[in-house]
Amino acid sequence: MQRLPRTLALASTILGGLFLSSCGKSSSTPDQGSTRANVTAVTTVAMIGDVVGQIGGEKVKVENLIGEGVDPHLYKPTANDVKKLQAADIVFYNGLLLEGKMTDIFVKIARSGKPVHAVTDTILNQGGYVMSTGEDHYDPHVWMDVAGWAKAAGDISESLAKFDPGNAAAYQERAASYTAELKKLDDYARKSLASIPEKQRVLVTAHDAFNYMARAYGLEVRGIQGISTESEAGLKDINGLVNFIVERKIPAVFVESSVPRKSVEALVEGARAKGHEVKIGGELYSDAMGPAGTYEGTYIGMIDHNVTLITRALGGEAPEKGLNGKLSR
C-alpha cells in the first residue's frame, strides 16, 4: 500500500456510499520501463487539468471533473465522478482541502493502490509557503501565484514520469518548455500590477481567493467571504468593506465567475449611498477558469485575464489584449 499524501491524512472518515466495494488494488500501474500511448489522468479542477494536458501532450488523456463556473469548495461528487476516478490510471487533485467534499474518496482510492497525487504536497512540505487562517485551515488558491503553480507543474511532471517511465523524457521536455512560458507570465504579472498607483493597489473581491497573488505581486486584498465560499457574508462584513472602500476611494471592485455577484453589487450600492462611486471592474476567474476551448480556458489565459483586468481597472498600464494578445474580453 502506498503512503498517503500529507493532505489526504487530514481526512478523518472514509466515504463509502458512492464507492464500489470491488475497487481492489489498481491494475493500471505500468511495468517499470514500459511505454504507454495513452495514460488516462483524472483531475479535479481545470487549473490542474490544463497543466497535466500541457505536460502530458498526446501521451495523456485528461478528464476533468469540475467544469467552468463551478465552485470546487461546494462541489459534491457524483456516482459518475467516482467511476471516472476508479477507471483512471492516475489522479491529480489540488489538496489543501480545496475539494473538501471529495477528500474521503481520494483516501479510499489511494488506499486501493492507485496513484493519487495532491499537486500542492511538495510546497506544503517545504514549509512557509502555504498560507492559512489557522491550524489545518489552509488557503488552497496556490495557482494565483504563477511561481508557486510552476512548482505544482514540476510535481505533475515528476508524477507522470514515475508512473510512465518510458515517456519520462517527453514529459520533462514539455515541462521545461511550459515552465518557460510560466516565467514570462510571472514577469508580466509583476510588471503590470506594479504599474498600478500604490494607493490603488487594493483588490476587493467576493471571497479570499487572491492572497497568493497579493503576496507575490504586492497587492492588498479584501474578500467579502473567507477562503471557502461555504462561509456566508454577513451585513457586518458588507458594511465594513463599504466603509473601507469609501475611505480609501477604491475605484473598482471585482466579481468572480464561480461566485454569485450579489455581495459585490451590495458593496457598489453601499458606497454610492455614502457618496462614492465605485465600479465593478470586471469578472475574475478564481476557483474556475474560462470556457473550455478559449484562451481564458487555459491556466496561462486565466491568469493573463485576471492580471490585465485588475491592472487596467485600478489605473495601471497593461495591453488591452494581455500578455499574448489573445484575450477575448
Image: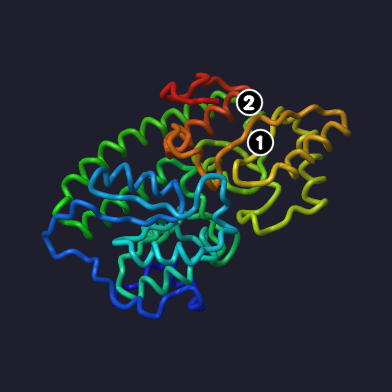
- The x and y percentages for residue 133 are 60, 59
**For residue 83, what is the image quadrant?**
bottom left
N-terminal-most mark, 1 or 2: 1
For the residues bearing labels 1 and 2, Cβ distance under 8 angstroms: yes
140, above or below 306, in the image: below
Measured from the top left, where is residue 107 in percent x and y? 42, 72
- Residue 291: x, y in percent? 50, 38
| Colour mapping used in the image | rainbow
Residue 294 point in image, percent of width and height: 45, 33
Q: Secondary structure at mark 2?
A: helix
- How packed mark 2 is, by other alpha carbons closer than 10 Å (few <14, some 14-19, many 20 or more), is some
Front residue of 200/311: it is 311
Instruction: Provide the residue designation for mark 1.
Output: 254
Residue drawn 51% across the image and 63% down it = 77
Split into 4 quadrants, where in the image is the N terminus? Answer: bottom left
- Disc 1 element: strand
Of the 4 image quadrants, the one containing the C terminus is: top right
172 and 71: which one is in front? 71
Residue type marked 1: Phe
Residue assigned mark 2? 313
From this viewpoint, which residue is outermost toward the front? 80
Residue at the far left in the pictured view: 33
Q: Amino acid at mark 2?
A: Ala
Is 222 displayed left or right of 325 in the figure?
Answer: right
Q: Is residue 82 left or right of residue 111?
A: right
3D distance between C-alphas at marks 1 and 2: 9 Å
